[in-house]
Amino acid sequence: MMTEDISKQDDARIRILIADDHPLLREALKNILERQPDFRVVGEASDGEEAINLAARLLPEVAILDINMPKVNGIEATRQIKTSHPDVAILVLTIYDDIPHILAIIEAGAAGYLTKKVFGDEVVNAVRNILAGDTVLVPAISRKLINHVLRHKTKSQAVFTHHDISKRELEVLTLAAMGKSNQDIAQVLSITSRTVKAYLTDIFSKLNVSSRTEAVVTALKSGIIDLDDIGSSDG
């Protein structure tokens, strides 16, 4: 386990926790992240239980977790961290790219999902994107997830009515499903990024979810949005 002194109140760097059972990977990831002048790795965990405890103690802005860890796996660790500390953004970095793992980690509340085939600058960009409120999925995983959900959806107009999604919220949700960033959505709809975040917050509340990806999955499953709405998203 590694933790840094967190008493420096004047340190405005982004606080990051890394959890993986492979020490060499943790070291490599730390080196990549700390090349950024505004990033600071404040803790390292070798298992999911330690990750949960360090997240509670250090309150990082971002926690980067593996799925396959001893004691508590990354899915359960994500669920517990998000339940106790919803402001901690979770980025999953794992070898798995199958639908069951993708769905499980998204439903647990992760904001991003990258495979370990993607490294270096992609991880740095992913951290910045999830802090900006954007979803992070590599295109291949995004396509796989959307195609799976569309094959298994159960369209229901009652769901739409029950959740009371407004027309503008539907526009935001549809653009999010197309993979648009908050800034892109703001530009398309001629509103501010702050307004986009406010709409997304309301959508999360109405759909009882905690991330853009989970909102998109829920909307696709229930038929709030469909393939015609997002037509070009997997092309």
Image: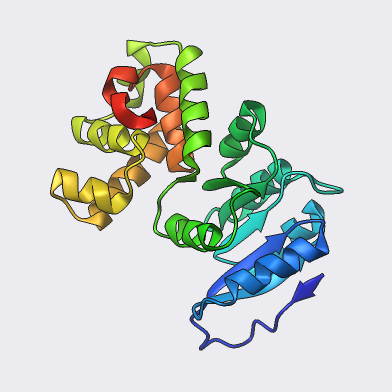
| Residue 97: quarter of image | top right
Residue that appears at 20% across and 30% down: 167
Judging depth in this view, the residue of 182 and 234 nearest the camera is 234
Q: Residue at x 48, y 81 (%)?
A: 12
Q: Could you tell me which quadrant the C terminus lies in?
A: top left
Q: Who is closer to the viewer here, 215 or 123?
A: 123
Front-lying residue, 20 or 140:
140
Residue 211 seen by the camera:
yes
Question: Which residue is depicted at the point 63% across and 48% down?
Answer: 117
Residue 113 in picture, x, y percent from top left = 57, 45
Q: Position of residue 100 (x, y in %)?
A: 65, 27
Q: Position of residue 61 (x, y in %)?
A: 54, 65
**Residue at image x 48%, y 34%?**
142
The residue at the far left in this view is 190
In the depicted structure, whether residue 62 falls above or below residue 176: below
Q: Is residue 131 left or right of residue 77?
A: left
Regarding residue 56, the answer to whether it shows in the image is no
**Is 160 rendered above or below residue 56?**
above
